[in-house]
Amino acid sequence: MEFRKYAARFRLTFYLVCDFESFLTPIDRNEDVDAIKATNLIDEHNVCGFACHRISEYPKYKTDPIIYSGPGVIDKFYEHVM
């Protein structure tokens, strides 16, 4: 068996596979309800960690997955990506 459909393969040479973990916390129910959106918010997501893995067709650019859980999750994620 041989792969011949090179035009059908994924065309990006690099991409990130990321997963964010979060938990729900109740929000203050005394806040005004947005009448335009007609929504009633109950909980909000608070990010508590992430995992990120760089994939590449070039072996020298592949990295091990990075896992972070702690304070400043979004800042750490941006720091990692940049």
Image (cartoon, rainbow, N blue to C red):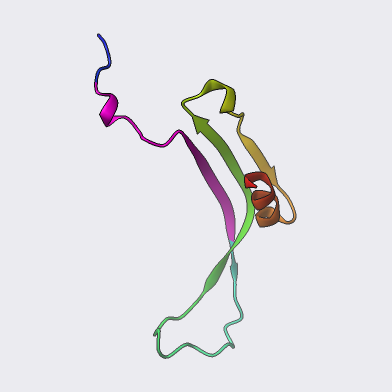
- Eyeballing the image, is 45 above or below 20? below
For the point 26% across and 30% down, which residue is it?
8
Residue 4: x %, y % from top left: 25, 18
Near-viewer residue (29 or 57): 57
Furthest residue to the right? Answer: 71
Which image quadrant: the N terminus?
top left
Near-viewer residue (65 or 79): 79
For the point 59% across and 76% down, which residue is it?
27
Q: In the image, 40: left or right of 50?
A: left
- Eyeballing the image, is 70 above or below 53? below
Q: Is residue 3 magenta?
A: no
Q: Quadrant of residue 30?
A: bottom right
For the point 42% across and 91% down, which residue is it?
35
Q: Is residue 12 magenta?
A: yes
Residue 24: x %, y % from top left: 57, 63
How many tags in the picture?
0
- Eyeballing the image, is 37 above or below 47? below
Magenta residues span: 5-23
Furthest residue to the top? Answer: 1
For the point 47% across and 88% down, which residue is it?
34
Residue 49: x %, y % from top left: 64, 49
Residue 53: x %, y % from top left: 56, 36
Near-viewer residue (48 or 54): 54
